[in-house]
């Protein structure tokens, strides 16, 4: 593994730049903006278009390769690969939609969409892993902020699509192929490992609060302007002014490092001296400590070979026992919960699969409704589903941001396991699915808002929980595997269940478009059952994790456990 050296710059610069990268990582949310063009210009059937949607979900959420790469190379390499994937994938789609290349095979476009949207996985993995390591004591807050901005990316791209790109699918694909990589090239210099925030800065809480408020203002602003532009015909100057204000709000998190540059705190001025004193103290302590927890390298010739046992994988058990007896090595134990796990060590744990299933039931059912939200609205008599989609997007943002804030507060106040919020939200999702199934007047928008919030909470809770259980060393790979629950749920519950039942009901009505509550009623009842199972599993997981959180957050502050792998 290469050595990843941390820089001396404050981590707030990287967090501000990561906000832009999270917006860029939302490029996969743009599929509804150009899917109709793929169908009309290229003559695809609805089934072919649906399979392209599956490709979109696969590319966005499968990030095992980025998870491997991020632990061996610096963040800029991960971001660079994502930028190249974005250019290659969306560039190929643009060549086809614009008519530059005619009769491009369907399978080429399917693969191109996976490659293009997979840039989301590279971008998200790089910024999440980097910032979780830069702010190890505020994992829930950081996860909520970054995933919150990710949830707003759809609305931001929609604003750009309408104002700058004139509602042109070809222009949008060109923007994704060129504009997103350019943004990545500008920001990749700032997204890098830094000296981790110690939590001693008294202004740290206010800095996080400022970014949270800035993201909330951005969310309300984008939702409001989207509704205004849909209701009123705003002129070109007003539209451009709206866009400029949106960009300024996106720049707001960078105000913190700018402020710290011109008005450094007393703590910042003395940090160098404190770090030097701590380094001297640690060095002196190490000199006097003859029994290190790391393997000892014996200088004598008789035990030199034993000291390098890590390089000799063929050592016999007898030699190993002799080496332990002579003190040449310390027997390596398996990591405990809260320490750094390798992927192969984590994947055999019951907590790993329990967390995966809880996330799978929650997000897998939620993404099913999201993928079919327009059809759900039409089935219940809502012809214009734009507001419905905007409402879900905004509430998704609220859930992501709020889930991080609330879980961080209670985990520090009462060492309450974060997974309890997964339990609460999945119980609410059960009620929400019953509301959808009832199709009563006035319940559609309420159910959509509740589902958006609960859906967002699942994301913001999964990220810090994974890092707290299995450590940060291999966090990227472990989190990427957890993320497979999203496309897996989309395929099973949306493609196979909801789509199949919808087509059956539409056939009964002798129409391609299904109208009425029966179109999705059985689907919603099945989803309610799945969330019931998820809620029960979440209760079990919460009980299992209570001692872990009591250990990690004893005294109201996070304590980094000593890893057995270091």
Image: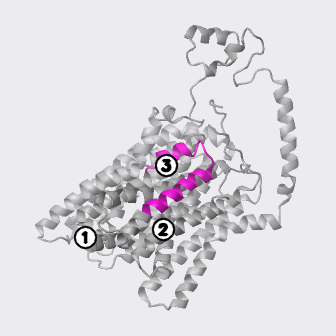
Identity of the residue drawn at 15% across and 61% down: 504
Determine the residue positioned at 57% across, 31% down.
Answer: 336
The residue labelled by disc 1 is 43
Residue at image location 48% in from the left, 57% down from the top: 85
| Colour pattern | one colour
**Pointer 3 with pointer 2, Cβ within 8 A:** no
Q: Is residue 169 left or right of residue 459?
A: left
| Magenta part, dominant SS | helix
Q: Nearer the viewer, mark 3 or mark 2?
A: 2
Asked which secondary structure carries label 1, the reply is loop
Which one is closest to the eye, mark 3 or mark 1? 1
Quarter in which the N terminus is drawn: top right
Q: Residues within 10 Å of mark 3 (few under 14, many from 20)?
A: some
Residue count near mark 1 (Cα–Cα under 10 Å), binned few <14, some 14–19, many ≥20? few
How far is the residue under mark 3 from the one under mark 2?
A: 38 Å
Q: Is residue 547 left or right of residue 177?
A: right
Left or right of residue 451, residue 512 in this image = left
- Provide the residue span drawn in magenta: 62-90
Picture coordinates of residue 415 (x, y %)?
60, 45
- Sequence order check: which comes first, mark 2 or mark 1? 1
Q: Tell me what residue is drawn at x 83 percent, y 61 percent.
A: 265
Q: Is residue 86 above or below residue 216?
A: above
Q: Which one is in front, 91 or 192?
A: 91
As helix, strand or loop, the secondary structure at mark 2 comes to helix
Q: Can see residue 406?
A: no
Query: Which residue is disc 3 drawn over?
Result: 420
The location of residue 467, given as percent across then percent down, is 57, 44
Residue 89 horizontal/vertical position (percent): 43, 60
The residue where tag 2 is placed is 176
């Amino acid at each position: 593994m290469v050595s990843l050296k941390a820089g001396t710059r404050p981590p707030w610069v990287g967090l501000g730049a990561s906000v832009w990268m999270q917006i860029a990582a939302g490029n996969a949310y743009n599929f509804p903006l150009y899917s109709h063009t793929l169908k009309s210009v290229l003559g695809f059937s609805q089934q072919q278009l649906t399979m392209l949607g599956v490709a979109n979900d696969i590319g966005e959420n499968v990030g095992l390769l980025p998870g491997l790469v991020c632990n061996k190379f610096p963040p800029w390499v991960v971001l660079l690969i994502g930028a190249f994937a974005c250019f290659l994938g969306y560039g190929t789609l643009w060549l086809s939609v614009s008519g530059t290349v005619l009769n491009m095979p369907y399978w080429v476009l399917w693969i191109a969409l996976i490659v293009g949207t997979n840039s989301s996985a590279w971008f998200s993995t790089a910024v999440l892993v980097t910032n979780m390591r830069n702010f190890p004591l505020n994992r829930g807050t950081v996860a909520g902020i970054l995933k919150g901005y990710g949830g707003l990316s759809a609305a931001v791209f929609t604003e750009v699509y309408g104002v700058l790109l004139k509602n042109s699918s070809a222009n949008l694909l060109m923007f994704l192929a060129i504009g997103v990589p350019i943004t990545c090239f500008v920001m990749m210099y700032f997204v890098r490992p830094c000296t981790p925030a110690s939590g001693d800065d008294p202004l740290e809480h206010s800095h996080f609060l400022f970014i949270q408020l800035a993201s909330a203002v951005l969310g309300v602003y984008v939702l409001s302007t989207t509704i205004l532009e849909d209701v009123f015909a705003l002129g070109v100057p007003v539209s451009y002014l709206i866009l400029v204000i949106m960009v300024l709000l996106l720049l707001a998190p960078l105000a913190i490092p700018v402020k710290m540059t011109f008005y450094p705190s007393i703590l910042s001025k003395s940090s160098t001296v404190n770090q030097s004193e701590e380094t001297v103290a640690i060095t002196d302590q190490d000199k006097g400590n003859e029994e290190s927890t790391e393997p000892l390298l014996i200088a004598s010739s008789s035990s030199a070979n034993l000291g390098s046992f890590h390089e000799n994988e063929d050592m016999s058990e007898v030699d190993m026992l002799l080496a332990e007896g002579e003190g040449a090595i310390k027997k390596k134990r398996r990591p405990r919960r809260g320490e750094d796990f390798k992927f192969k060590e984590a994947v055999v744990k019951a907590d790993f699969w329990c967390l995966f299933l809880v996330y799978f039931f929650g997000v897998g059912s939620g993404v099913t409704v999201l993928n079919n939200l327009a059809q759900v609205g039409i089935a219940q008599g809502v012809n214009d589903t734009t507001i419905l989609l905007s409402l879900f997007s905004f509430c998704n943002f609220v859930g992501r941001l709020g889930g991080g804030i609330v879980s961080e507060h209670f985990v520090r106040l009462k060492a309450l396991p974060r997974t309890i919020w997964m339990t609460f939200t999945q119980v609410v999702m059960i009620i929400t699915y019953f509301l959808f199934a009832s199709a009563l007047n006035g319940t559609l928008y309420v159910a959509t808002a509740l589902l958006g919030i609960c859906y967002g909470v699942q994301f913001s809770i999964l990220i810090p929980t994974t890092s707290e259980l299995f450590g940060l060393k291999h966090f990227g790979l472990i989190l990427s595997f957890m993320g497979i629950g999203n496309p897996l749920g989309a395929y099973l519950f949306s493609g196979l269940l909801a789509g199949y039942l919808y087509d059956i009901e539409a056939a009964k009505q002798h129409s391609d478009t299904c109208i009425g509550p029966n179109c999705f009623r059985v689907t919603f009842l099945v989803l309610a059952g799945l969330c019931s199972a998820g809620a029960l599993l979440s209760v079990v997981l919460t009980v299992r994790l209570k001692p872990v959180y009591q250990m990690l957050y004893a005294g109201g502050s996070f304590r980094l456990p000593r890893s057995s792998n270091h």
